[in-house]
Amino acid sequence: MRRRIVIVMILTTAVALVVILIPALFALRAAAAHEQEIELQHEAFTAVKQFEAVGTVAQLEEHFISAYLPDGTLLDGDGPTELDEVTRQALAGTPGLATAGDYVIAAVPLSNGGALRISEELAESERSALIGVAWLCAAALAIASLSYIAASRLSRTLSNPLGELAVSAGRLGADDANDARPRSGIAEVDRIADALRSSTARVSTLLHRERRLTSYNAHQLRTPLTGMRLAVEAEIAHPRDDRAELLNELLQALDRLEMASDSLIATYRMPPNRHENTEVVELVHAAVSRWRNTFELSGRAISTTSSGHLIARTRPGTVDTVLDVLIENALHHGAGKVRLDVDGTRDSVLIGVLDEGAFDDAAPEAALFSMQPLDTHGIGLTLARTLAEAEGGDIVLTSRHPTKFSFIVPCPADDTPAEATAAP
C-alpha cells in the first residue's frame, strides 16, 4: 500500500509538472526573445544619440553597429554593404525591427536622413531562456522531492494504523489481545478501530462465556455419568431379577444429563424469566431422592425434613443444578450426614445444605468461589454462585462448624412464602 501511494503521488506530480512546464518553456522562450528585442531597440536609440553627438559609431560587446548615408552607402561600422529590409525602412524614416537568420536586427533613422543599424545574435536570448529553463527544472525537481517526502509520510500515516488494525483483526479472540492502541488521528481509521475494538470486546466476552459454559457443562455432566457407571457396575456384580429397574435408573440419569445441560445453556444464552415461579420444596425432596443411593454407597446419609410449599422466582433447572453442586461438594469435601433445610421470608427462600464437617477458619470465603481445577471446591461452587446470581440470588457460606452453604432465591414480588417446617 505504501509503495502504491508513493507511486501514484509521484506520477500525479510528474504529469502536473509536464502539463505546466511545456507551455511555460515556450512562454519563457518567447519572453526572452521579446526582452532581447526591447533591449536591442533601446541600445539602438542610445547608439543614435552617441553617433549624432560625436559623429562615429561606438561598438558594443556582442553587438554589430553601423551607420548609413541617406543613399544607403555604409558610412561607419561593420554592417553589411547590401541593405536589408529593416535598414531600408529606417532610411525611409520609420524605425524597424526583424529577425533574420541567427540575428535580431534593429534600425533607427538619423537626423541627416541616414540610418543606424544594430544587430545581435539570437543565442543571447537562447542563453537567457536556458537559464530560466534551468530554474524551472530546479523548481520542478524540488516540487517532485517534496511530493515524494509528502507521499512517504502520508503512506506511513495511512498504512501504519491500517497495519495495526490488521494485526488486531488477526488476533481477534486471542486471550492476550491488546486493544489499547493510540488513536491515529485519521477519523475514518479511528472509526474502524473503534468498531473493531467493540467487536473484539464482544467476541472476547462471548468466548469467555462459551469457555465457562463448556467447563461447567463438563463438570455437571460428570456426576450423572458417574452414577450411570456405578449403576451398571452394581448390576453386573449383583444382577437384579427385574432389569427394568436398571433401565429406569439409567433413564433418570439421562434425564439429569439433559436437564443439567439445558439449564446451563439457558442460563448462559437466554435471559432469565423474572416471572417464572418454582415450587422449591418439591425440588429439594427430588434432589435428596436423586442422591440417596450415591450417599448409601459411600456409607453416608442424606435427608430433609422440609415440607409445605415455598414459591421462588427462579427456573427449576437452576435450582436442581445448584443443589447438585452443593450436595456433591458436601459428599466429597464434607463429613457425616448431609441435611437440606428450607426456610422462607417475605423476600426470599433459603435452601441450606448442612454437613457435619468443618471449614478452615483461616481460609477466606472468596477462595471457595474462585475458578479452581475440577478436583477442588472451586469450579462447582463458582458455577453454583454464577447460576444463583443469574436468577437474582446468591450462594453464601453461613456456617463453618458445621459447614453450611445457603442458596438464596428471590420470591415473587406479590407472593409471601408459606411456612415451611425445617429441621432444627
Image (spheres, grey):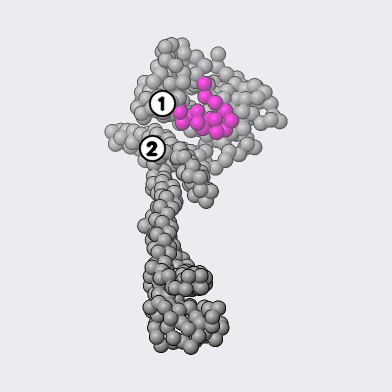
Q: Residue at x 62, y 32 (%)?
A: 313
Secondary element under disc 2, as helix, strand or loop, is loop
Task: Name the residue carrying label 1.
Answer: 378
Residue, x 53% and y 30% (percent of image)? 388
Q: Residue at x 45, y 68 (%)?
A: 21
> Where, by quadrant of the figure, is residue 300 drawn?
top left
* 119 vs 261: above or below: below
* Screen quadrant of the N terminus: bottom left
Look at the image and tell me in which quarter the C terminus lies: top right
Residue 346: percent from the left, percent from the top? 67, 23
Question: Main SS type for the magenta part?
Answer: helix
Q: Tell me, yes or no, whether the two marked residues, 1 and 2, touch with CB atoms within 8 Å.
A: no
Q: CA distance from mark 1 to mark 2?
A: 24 Å
Where is residue 64 drawn, in percent x and y? 40, 75
What residue sits 54% from the left and 30% below the top? 389
Q: In the rendered image of this protein, does residue 182 appear above or below residue 374?
A: below
Front in this rendered view, residue 271 or 309: 271
Q: Which mark is residue 253?
A: none
> In the picture shown, does residue 298 fall above or below 357?
below
Between 94 and 73, the one lying in front of the other is 73
Residue 231 or 204: which is nearer the viewer?
Answer: 204
Image coords of residue 183 (percent x, y): 49, 42
Is tag 1's residue or tag 2's residue first in the polypeptide sequence?
Answer: 2
Magenta region, residue range: 381-396
The spot of residue 288 in percent (x, y) is 48, 27
Q: Looking at this rendering, what residue extends furthest in the left direction?
A: 237
Q: Which residue is mark 2?
A: 176
Question: Magenta includes 308?
Answer: no
**Is residue 255 in view from this perspective?**
no
Determine which quarter of the picture holds residue 218.
top left
